Amino acid sequence: MEPIPTRLRLLDAAAQVFLSQGFADASMDQVRQQAGVSNGSLYHHFPTKAHLADALYAHTLRDFHATLMVPITSRATAQSGTKGLIRAYIDWVERHPDRARLLDQLRLTGGSEREAANAEGFGTLAAWVAARVEAGDMRSMPFPVWLALVFSPALSLTRHWVTQPAPAVPARVRAALEHGAWMAVAA
């Protein structure tokens, strides 16, 4: 078995430390100790805690986006794709509540890696939405408005879901969120 690259060990350690201590109270030394690396290795990869948080957020966000985009990569209709996005979102949160908490905790940290990860995910999604609008299957609106209408209800509930010992979103809640997302953007 190959050893885990130092950068990934540091990201994993940072996730554990940030979740247990909170980002503000976590120290670089706690991350270094959790990862079992030297100061030189830590600071070679991440010169500051802000750089580490940015990289961790982007790493987690890319995994989230990869899962989220699955429903729209096939020949999804506007309705099945929109509902599928919400379904994929909820499934990811249920499977990875710690990562969902981490994204919420680090959402205000900002940084260039985070911006690049968002640009990749949003670019794919925006292109899919534009194609559905052009086909007449969705109403035309600014992309940030589309995002807010589709995802805000689920985003606002995520904090509640991830505080449960075993996050589980009831089928009727899922159905309501999927239906609401679709109704908000349907042509």
Image (cartoon, rainbow, N blue to C red):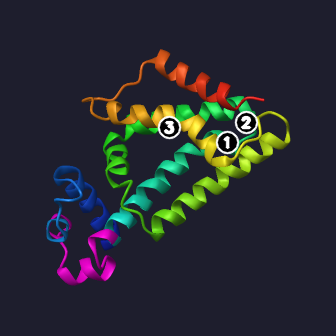
Q: Quadrant of the N terminus?
A: bottom left
Residue 4 can be seen in this image: no
Q: Earlier in the sequence, mark 1 or mark 3?
A: 1
The answer to whether the residue labelled 1 contacts the one labelled 2, judged by CB atoms less than 8 Å apart, is: yes
Residue plotted at (50% across, 37% down): 89
Where is mark 2, residue-wise?
Answer: 76
Label 1 vs label 3: CA separation?
A: 13 Å
Furthest-right residue in this view: 135
Where is mark 3, residue-wise?
Answer: 89
Magenta range = 32-50
Q: Residues within 10 Å of mark 1 (few under 14, many from 20)?
A: many
On the picture, is 121 further left or further right than 103? right
Q: Main secondary structure of the magenta part?
A: helix
Magenta stretch: includes residue 49: yes
Q: Earlier in the sequence, mark 2 or mark 3?
A: 2
Rendering coords of residue 112 (x, y %) = 47, 70
Dot label at residue 72: 1
Rendering coords of residue 52 (x, y %) = 32, 69
